[in-house]
Amino acid sequence: MKQSMLYPRATSTRRVADMNGMWKFRLDKENEGEEQGWKNGIPGADLIPVPASFNDFYTDKESREFTGDFWYETEVFVPGEWKGRHIDVRFAAVTHRCTVYVNGQEIISHEGGFLPFSARIDEVVNWNEPNRVVVKGNNELSFTSLPAGISVTLENGRKMTKPFFDFFNYAGIQRPVKLVVLPEESIVDFTLNYALEGNDASVSYQVETTGDHPVTVEVYDESGKPVARGEGKEGCLKIENVHLWEVHNAYLYHFVLKVLDGEEVLDEYYDEIGIRTFAVEGNRFLLNGNPVYLKGFGKHEDSDIVGRGFNIGVMKRDFELMKWIGANSFRTSHYPYSEEIYQMADREGFLVIDELPAVGFFESLANFVDAVSGKTTNFFDRPTVPELKKNQLAMLEDLIARDKNHACVIAWSLFNEPDTMTDSAAPYFEEIFARAKELDVQKRPRTFAMELNSSPEHCKCHQFCDFLCLNRYYGWYLLGGYEMVNAETAFRKEMDAWLAKGVNCPMVFTEYGCDNLQGEHKLPSVQWSTEYEMEYLEMFHRVFDSYECVKGEQVWNFADFQTVEGIMRVNGNKKGIFTRQRQPKEAAYYFKKRWESLPLDYKG
Ligand code: GCB
């Protein structure tokens, strides 16, 4: 049976019960959980919140850095009145993989820490009684995991992860868990696409259900007035005088799907949909046919105490800050974010570049240094590549299934900073890019974020992109400090080389930025000071403003975030324009001024 990626919603035919809260928890330090039968109950367990990363609650390093299996347990009461329906336990994300047991029976294993999955439990459930749900999670990294890295064993026998990426390897049940009660015949999926004709829109739809009963779809405007209705699993609706979804001016229609048996509603589902088109034309982005310039951030799901756990308050604050500063977009670097974030972006009218967790495809423990070194790691020559590709394709399928109906999602970023310098990368990329096109009915533009080694001279994969995303650190990782003048020259030389190659598509700077310790001042400037950051940003913006093909700037990063410890990081990455506590650094005021003065159709 196909997994439904639909967001859990209660309707006249569906029930949703929240399973979040304090769960039992134990790190499997001696690797004994399997043998000791912890699937039937975890002895000596601690209590821990769900959703959250487990790492930052504890006061000892062994817990924070723990690598291996970890176990969660809870009880869920399943009322007898639900008998005869399907019961799914739905995990929005368990990082990076897990196996789920209900009443001691294994019901599902899932690979990948950033996308949802459901396990059907009707067969194993005890009705009108509490049911034990146990999750065995694992956070190890490998050459076949997304994100990629390695796990090593220390002299004391403890394992440790060494990511090939620059964010802390947070893990656990990081997003909400819900019990979803579905009718016998149910809606599994729906897919929307839009075309605009004058003041009207046509909305083509496809619905997938588990049965053969007829389907109806209805569209209501924001005042609740019905504006279109269709019958059948496929069709095209016409909406006259359409209210389009626009940047910072989102209009959302209420879309209702029903499976009917005569008068009886067998299943009902709804969503809020924004009607818009998005396309690349020459070197322009067109939203509803009008040029748009992207202003915003590369972000992380990262905050104090809960780590990468979904934090609804932080989400709200982040959107308020992004509106305050004049941003209109962000990239979900470096993994698909929580579903609620896309719902919020739909509501607030933000443009989102949606990224797969295909990060660390460059063998390096300090990729921020190696990525500018010109070195190749022959990543795609490894024998592990077929397995990696299988995992990436599975995640791509789930990502597009999950996010395809979001108005905010304007593009797919299929990798972050992979090693594209060897010929073997090209067929791998070709397959992933082709599959993304095949899966997405809206044919959103596809891209990947390129590090400096992916240069006009050496990159073997940029030709697969519908637009280029460049991560560039001229003046920070290279040619920093007093050499800044050379940084600008080198930067312009690279831009000219792309154009000389005949590249004629939008270019977005999906990363640029330098670390800044809040409150550090120095005259004349030195790296890490606020003064230096200003000079650096002014240099970048001078270059952006002088190239017509630059159609977006997403500074790295929205906020300071946790990474592995090391001499290049002062308790994390400090490139945030906001602190980790979501307060502005000085650069925030500089960006506010710039972004508020750049029109939406800048260089259009
Ligand atoms: C990059 C990576 C990002 C790092 C950033 C940095 O190129 O894509 O994950 O955090 O550089 O600050 O070094």
Image: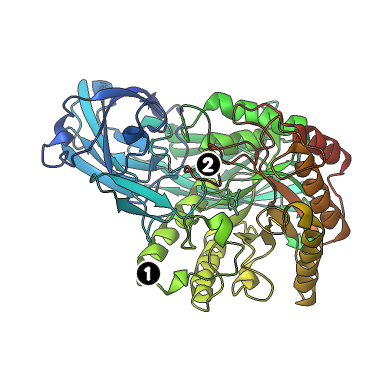
Question: Can you give x and y, in whole percent of width and height, for residue 99 in the image?
Answer: 26, 43
**Extreme bottom residue here?**
423
Front one among 287 and 510: 510
Task: Classify mark 2: helix, strand or loop.
Answer: loop
Residues at badges 1 and 2 in contact (C-beta under 8 Å)? no
Q: Which residue is mark 2?
A: 337
Question: Can you give x and y, in whole percent of width and height, for residue 313 in the image?
Answer: 56, 23
**Left-right relation of 338 to 447:** left
Ligand 1 is within 8 Å of the C-beta of the residue at disc 2: no
Q: Which residue is mark 1?
A: 386
Question: Can you give x and y, in whole percent of width and height, for residue 406 in the image?
Answer: 60, 44
Residue at 21% from the left image edge and 28% from the top image edge: 132
Task: Classify mark 1: helix, strand or loop.
Answer: helix
Q: Quadrant of residue 281?
A: bottom right
Above or below residue 17? Residue 250 is: below
Residue at 87% from the left image edge and 44% from the top image edge: 599
Residue 183 visible in the shown view: no
**Left-right relation of 536 to 119:** right
Residue at 46% from the left image edge and 69% from the top image edge: 379
**Left-right relation of 468 to 424:** right
**Left-right relation of 230 to 277:** left
Above or below residue 278? Residue 75 is: above
- Inspect the image, locate mark 2, and give the three-letter code of the amino acid beneath it: Tyr
Dot 2 crowding, Cα within 10 Å, few <14, some 14–19, many 20+: many
Residue at 72% from the left image edge and 36% from the top image edge: 250
Q: CA gap, disc 1 to disc 2? A: 26 Å
- Inspect the image, locate mark 1, and give the three-letter code of the amino acid beneath it: Pro
Q: Quadrant of residue 128?
A: top left
Front one among 489 and 97: 489
Residue 534 visible in the shown view: yes
Q: Quadrant of residue 50?
A: top left
